[in-house]
Image: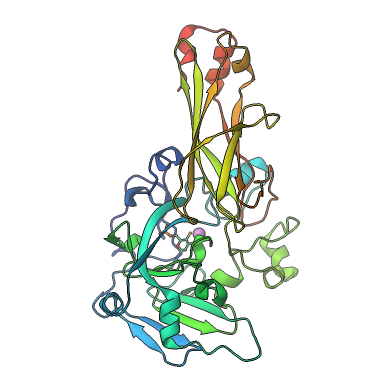
Amino acid sequence: MDFCHEPPHSKNLNVLGKEPFNAEPSVADLVEYSLTPEHLVYCRNHSPILPLNVETFKVKIDGLVSKALGFTLKDLQSGYACTDVVAALQCAGNRRNTMSQKKSKKTEGLQWKEGVICNDRWSGVALRSILLSAGIAIPPDGTQLHVLFGSHIAPCQEASYYETSVPLEKVMDEEGDVLLAYAMNGRPLTPDRGYPFRLVIPGYAGVRWTKWVDRITVSSTESDNFYQQRDYKILPPNVNSHSMAEKGSWWSKVVPLQTNPLNSVVANVTLHKSSRPSLSAKGYAIAGSTGQVQKVEISTDDGATWLPARITYQEGKWSWTLWEADIEVAEDGAERLGVRKVISRATDESGRIQPNDCEWNLRGLGYCGYGEMSVGQEFEGSFLGSSAHCLLPY
Ligand SMILES: Nc1nc2c(c(=O)[nH]1)N[C@H]1C(S)=C(S)[C@@H](COP(=O)(O)O)O[C@H]1N2
Ligand SMILES: [Mo]
């Protein structure tokens, strides 16, 4: 495969794979911004990124519509009203490495930490209005329809092109905010982000947000592409290997992962040394499918007691939530002695609480156990009354 034409990527990311390019920022950097700047947005690719001729590159709308349509970027911008939405984009493999470690069991795939997420303002056209102008032909028998998002710019690792799908209801829901997006934070998408167009499907896993999309098809079946059918599925925990998955036909028995799980992550823990020492923690949370995050709590005693964190950012129903918490540490150090780690949990509007634990699955998808960051070894040393300089492990 020819990777010579790859655009330059951000230098602020930890690279997990060069060809195709896969990289994530440090989670501590990430939570410093409510809207993630381009240079801190993770890159998740199953193919190389090839240069496109934007004058001629078209996205076609076809399938169960009365009139097939096709748009270049210019056509789209002149033909439809621009609308925008702030939404978190998250890879289904976010926290995969955490799952491997917590479960002491290897998961398959790039060992993403907790930075395969971003939160941005996306602008473009409501896909609903494009499909309405194409005239969707809803079958009278009430068959569930799907919308397939294909990109044929380059062969992928496991398939000759990229395609995924979501149920038509999500796209036609006026509150669903599904966009055919051409800008992020007021600027045209970069090649890394899918220039000239990508899908924005708030609340849904990143895998469905097809970049460089060139075909949108209304269909009576899901996409049959590898990335819809044989990956991005949470297989039962007893399916330990690919050969077991094949033998038990598990890929066809399990539905694709669509919406994000309710989640929270501790991104940073800092010790403030003063006359009254304190710890501060910050992190992010993201909603699942039952409403926006309503509160985030932290615990320093392994969940015996919980303290509310301050929500410092949230914007509309699809954004991530940023939070911070200060933890008082008693002067005599007694309380400090107990602080080995800070854990977090989120609760959403419906009252659902992020679970403590999350089952292992082969592909390491959808990990959503409590957020956790340990307070380093050095700090532990300082509890035990070792020399003063040990009090500054951070
Ligand atoms: N055409 C295409 N679209 C794609 C992908 C891809 O490999 N090819 N990766 C998907 C996955 S798995 C994720 S998580 C997001 C990542 O988007 P980003 O690279 O802009 O962060 O894009 C999705 N869209
Ligand atoms: Mo992903």
| Residue 299 shown left or right of residue 36 in the figure | right
Residue 358 is situated, as x and y percent measured from the top left of the image, at 68, 48
The image quadrant that residue 385 belongs to is top right
- Residue at 73%, 55% (x, y): give it: 237
Q: Quadrant of residue 50?
A: bottom left
Numbered-mark total: 0
- Taking the spot 66% from the left edge, 26% from the top edge, the residue there is 301
- In which quarter of the view is residue 33 placed? top left
Q: Quadrant of the C terminus?
A: top left
| Image position of 91 (left or right of 251) | left
Is residue 55 something that shows in the picture? yes
Q: Is residue 17 visible?
A: no
Q: Is 372 situated left or right of 188 in this image?
A: right
Q: Position of residue 24 (x, y in %)?
A: 43, 48
**In the rendered image, which quarter contains the N terminus?**
bottom left
Q: Position of residue 42 (x, y in %)?
A: 41, 52
* Residue at image location 73% in from the left, 63% down from the top: 244
Q: Is residue 249 above or below residue 354?
A: below
- Give whichever of 373, 78 is nearer the camera: 78
* 282 w.r.t. 236: above or below: above
